[in-house]
Each structure stands twice: as C-alpha cells, then as structure tokens.
C-alpha cells in the first residue's frame, strides 16, 4: 500500500502543476474591464470641464452598466458641474447659456427639483431686471423725443406770433387812403452794391440770434430803399420766411412808408439762409 502511494505521488504532483499553469494562462487571457475604462474617461471629462462629452458618456454607461451604484454619484457630480457653469454664465450676464446649463442640470436630477431652485430663481430675477431696464430706457427715449417735439412746437409758435405781431405793426403803419402823405424821411446814402445781385447771408437765423439779425436787416433795408431792390429770401424752412419778411418790411417802412417792397421766397435746406438783392430799374 505504501509502495502504491509512493508511485502515485509524482502523478498527482504533475496534475496539480498542470492545473496551476492552465489557471494562470486563463487569468492572463482576461481582457481589461471596459467599464473601468469608461468611468476613467468620465472622470477625465469632468475634470477638464467637458460637460457635454461627460453627459454623453454617462448616458452610454446608464445603458451598458445599468444598476451600477457609481452612476448616481456621477449623475449628481455632473449636475453640480452644470449648475456651477450656469452660475458663472449668470454672473457674466449671459442669461441664455445660464438657462441652458440649468436645463442640463434638471435633466440629470429630475428627482431633486430643489437642487436647481436657486439658479432658476436667479435667472428669472435677472430676466425681470433686464426687462425693467429695457422698459425704463424705452420710456426715457420716448420722453426725450416728446420733449424735443414740444420744444420745436413752442419755437414755431413763438416765431408765428412774432411774425403776426410784425405784420400787424406793418399794417397799422400803412398810410390810409386819402390821408395826407407823410413826409418822406431822408434816407442816408447806401453803400454801393458789390454786385448786380449781391448776397447777404443770415447765419444768425440758424442760431436764433434775433438781436444781431435785426442789426443786419437794418443795413439791408437801407440798401433796398436806396437802390429800389427786389429781395429773394432764401431760408431752410418755410416757417422762417414770414419772420424774416416781417422784420425786413418793418425796417423798410420805417425808412420809407410809401416804398412798395417786393419779396419772394426760396427754400434752400442745405444752404445758409441768405438774401438776394436785385435792382428793379
């Protein structure tokens, strides 16, 4: 019996050694765990801020590794990363990207709505503030336009009233029919005209400088009476013609109440207002 056991011992040892070699060969042939590699890539995407890639990789893992306890942890980690990105976008005033980041976070953690409440409320508040500022700016612009229009209307009203007063004064000074003719005042000799149709510019009209405009027209009236000139009044806007004509007529009548002035109007929007004098004889 002892001799049999001694003879069988080498056979048993060889069998065990052969089994051990086969086992080692099988372990060496086992491939690397694909899930471990996927989770490593997911970690790297999160660390590098590649949230879109990380979200796509997590969706793939939810299919290939359903039930893995690590998925919930990565889901929460990715949702926090999207919320942080949304906060950054909100601080920079980028409401669109903040809203997109919030949408990603909600899709990852639909079972935890309180997680996104803070950012959601901040985005709504920022939108309300932006709309309020836009509305305030719109109202301020409308008020400025209304104020400018009112100022223009007021200026036009004053000019119209001044023209009406001048016209009334001219009519009141007109010699009545059958009334004795007033003594014709002596008119000082006017300076010789510089050309056949001399031009007298009136930049004062553009500046609403009525005082200097009146001084200018005093000299023009003397030239009109002395040389019996017709006058073309060239202005930028039609409303300026009655005003200039009234001022000029008052000065001509003061120099010679019987003088028959001849005025015409010409609109020149792109030109400095001017008077064109042309002798009628």
Image: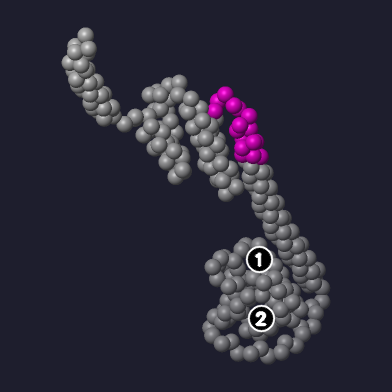
Q: Residue at x 28, y 29 (%)?
A: 31
Visible residue check, residue 171: no
Q: Which residue is mark 1?
A: 240
**Figure quadrant of the C terminus:** bottom right
**Left or right: 243 with respect to 89?**
right
Q: Secondary structure at mark 2?
A: helix
Visible residue check, residue 145: yes
Which label number is shown at residue 220? 2
Which label number is shown at residue 125? none
- Tell which tag, 2 or 1, sits nearer the viewer: 1
Q: Residue at x 21, y 9 (%)?
A: 1
* Quarter of the figure with residue 232: bottom right
* Total number of numbered discs in the rendering: 2
Percent of width and height locating residue 276: 58, 76
**Labels 2 and 1: the sequence-earlier one:** 2
Q: Which residues are magenta?
A: 109-125
The residue furthest top is 1
Q: Residue at x 66, y 66 (%)?
A: 240
**Prevailing secondary structure of the magenta residues:** helix
Relative to 268, residue 182 above or below:
below
**Left or right: 139 with respect to 177?**
left
Which of the two residues, 218 or 262, is positioned nearer the viewer here?
A: 218
How much space separates mark 2 and mark 1, taking CA atoms?
17 Å
Percent of width and height locating residue 10: 19, 20
Percent of width and height locating residue 250: 74, 74
Percent of width and height locating residue 179: 82, 73
């Amino acid at each position: 019996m002892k001799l049999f056991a001694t003879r069988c011992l080498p056979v048993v040892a060889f069998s065990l050694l052969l089994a051990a070699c086969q086992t080692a060969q099988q372990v060496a042939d086992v491939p690397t765990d694909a899930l471990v590699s996927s989770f490593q890539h997911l970690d790297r995407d999160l660390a590098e801020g590649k949230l879109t890639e990380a979200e796509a990789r997590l969706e793939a893992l939810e299919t290939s590794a359903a039930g893995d306890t690590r998925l919930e942890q990565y889901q929460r980690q990715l949702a926090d990363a999207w919320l942080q990105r949304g906060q950054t976008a909100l601080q920079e005033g980028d409401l669109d990207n903040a809203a997109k980041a919030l949408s990603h976070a909600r899709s990852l953690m639909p079972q935890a709505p309180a997680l996104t409440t803070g950012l959601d409320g901040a985005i709504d508040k920022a939108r309300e503030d932006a709309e309020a500022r836009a509305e305030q700016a719109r109202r301020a612009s409308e008020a400025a336009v209304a104020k400018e229009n009112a100022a223009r209307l007021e200026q036009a009203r004053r000019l119209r009233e001044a023209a009406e007063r001048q016209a009334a004064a001219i009519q009141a000074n007109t010699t009545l029919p059958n009334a004795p003719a007033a003594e014709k005042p002596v008119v000082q000799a006017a300076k010789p005209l510089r050309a056949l149709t001399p031009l007298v510019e009136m930049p004062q009209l553009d500046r609403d400088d009525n005082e200097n405009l009146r001084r200018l027209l005093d000299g023009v009236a003397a030239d009109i009476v002395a040389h019996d000139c017709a006058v073309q009044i060239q202005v930028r806007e039609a409303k300026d013609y009655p005003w200039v004509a009234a001022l000029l007529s008052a000065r001509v009548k003061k120099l010679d109440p019987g003088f028959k002035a001849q005025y015409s109007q010409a609109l020149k929007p792109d030109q400095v207002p001017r008077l064109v004098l042309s002798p009628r004889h």
